[in-house]
Amino acid sequence: MMRWLLFGALLGVLLLVPSVTTLAAAVASWAIGQPVLLAFVLGAAARPHLPRMRRWAR
């Protein structure tokens, strides 16, 4: 519920203030251009979905 409220507030700000949309696009394109940052974010997002290994296989 709170996630949708925050998403709606963010969407409202982006629609009401056009310069914020331009700034958000600039920040997103800069972040995508950084391969180390992009790899870290993708790894952090995938981490909860990876299976855990309980001990080392011999």
Image (cartoon, rainbow, N blue to C red):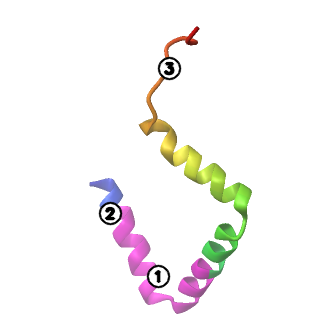
Judge the density around disc 2: few (<14), some (14-19), many (≥20) Cα neighbours within 10 Å: few
Name which residue type carries label 3: Met
Query: Amino acid type of disc 1?
Result: Leu
Quadrant position of the N terminus in the picture: bottom left
Mark 1 burial class by Cα count in 10 Å: few <14, some 14-19, many 20+:
some
Q: Position of residue 15 (x, y in %)?
A: 42, 86
Most extreme residue toward the front, as rendered? 58
Q: Main secondary structure of the magenta part?
A: helix
Q: Please state the horizontal and vertical placement of residue 57, each as a whole percent of the image.
A: 55, 12
| Closer to viewer: mark 3 or mark 1 | 3
Task: Inspect the image, locate mark 2, and give the three-letter code of the amino acid beneath it.
Answer: Leu
Q: Is residue 57 above or below residue 11?
A: above
Q: Position of residue 49 (x, y in %)?
A: 42, 38
Which region of the structure is painted magenta?
A: 5-25
Q: What is the C-alpha distance between the residues marked 3 and 1?
A: 43 Å
Which is more N-terminal, label 1 or label 2? 2
Q: Nearer the viewer, residue 12 or 42?
A: 42
Viewer-side label of 2, 3: 3
Q: Residues within 10 Å of mark 3 (few under 14, many from 20)?
A: few
Residue at 34 percent of width and 71 percent of height = 8
| Residue identifier under label 1 | 14
Task: Quote the CA–CA distance across marks 2 and 3.
Answer: 37 Å
Which tag, 3 or 1, sits closer to the chain's start? 1
Where is residue 44 drawn, in percent x and y? 56, 44
Q: Is residue 57 above or below residue 39?
A: above
Instruction: Residue under label 2, please give it.
Output: 5
> Would residue 6 be counted in the magenta stretch?
yes
Which residue is depicted at the point 31% across and 62% down?
4
Task: Name the residue tied to disc 3.
Answer: 53
Q: Secondary structure at mark 2?
A: helix
Circle 3: element type: loop
